[in-house]
Image: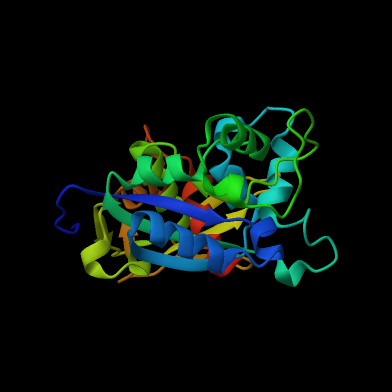
Amino acid sequence: MKAERDNSEQTLVLIKPDALLYSLTGFIIERVSAVHNPTIAASKVVRVTQELAEEHYSNIKGKSFYPETLRYIMGDLHYPTKPEKRRVVAIVYEGIDIVNKIKGYFGPTRPKDAKQLAREKGIITLRAQLSYADYSVDREERIDNAVHASENEAEAEREIKLWFEPGDFPEQHRFFDYVESEEHFYYSKESGEGKYRLLNIREPGSKGIIAPGALVWETDYQNLLLYRDKRSSPTISLNSIIAKYLIKTG
């Protein structure tokens, strides 16, 4: 099942720990609304687990800045002594061509590039407006860019399904196919770091992630059945599927 849709798209926006530290959440939401007036299809406050961070930034795994980026989105860098404040605000915006509109409005990934774009071409993006840090055009030690927006429509679907479950949306805003689970699914950690084992019977130390009647993205559900039955050709990593459920169980 999925909602009927016109030409609207959905995109994921994350308000990152540095923006929360400087109390910019209201400003960011107000500016997005004022500039593009999209519909908010879903929102939540998320404590970002290691698993979720790794899956979100899987495209930069192996880069020199990958470990620091994980610590950034998990809140470690901005709240080193206050773990209870480590969180992000995740929002799914909906509207016509909304992926490109919000990505364009947020501007270049690096704040110094956003400021240079404003200075040289007069193009004022959101990251250029966020003046909580004085970034040099020539030097930047760390990228505190306040917000994330999906790069394209395919990435938006991947990211939305990672950060949200179908039940997080009102029915009319569930754009992607979903099913009602007929099975119990549990997971436990294997001895290797970051590895998981999928179970359909509860074992000591395991955690439940899906119960009968729960709404699950169809792609996740079909892949869970493949992993459970030890069949070939899953198209989504087990860690990716489990990561989203650790939002509420971790």
In this picture, residue 142 sits left or right of residue 32: right
Front residue of 39/114: it is 114
Is residue 201 shown to the viewer in this render? no
Q: Residue furthest right?
A: 81
Q: Quadrant of the N terminus?
A: bottom left
Q: Who is closer to the viewer here, 184 or 235?
A: 235
Q: Quadrant of the C terminus?
A: bottom right
Given residues 113 and 13, the one toward you in this image is 113
- Residue 204: name its quadrant: bottom right
Residue 133 x/y as whole percent: 75, 50
Q: How many marks?
A: 0
Residue at image x 66%, y 51%?
73
- Point 45% across, 60% down: residue: 91
Spot occupied by residue 137 in the image (x, y as percentages of width and height): 73, 31
Tell me what residue is drawn at x 25 percent, y 54 percent. 175
Rendered view: 27 above or below 157 = below
Q: Where's residue 142, x and y in %?
A: 76, 40
Please name the colour scheme applied to the rendered image.
rainbow
Q: Residue at x 72, y 55 (%)?
A: 132
Q: Is residue 146 above or below residue 200?
A: above
**Residue 236 quadrant:** top left
Q: x, y (%) of residue 55?
A: 55, 44
Q: Does any portion of residue 3 appear in the rendered image? A: yes
In the displayed structure, 210 sits above or below 10; it is: below
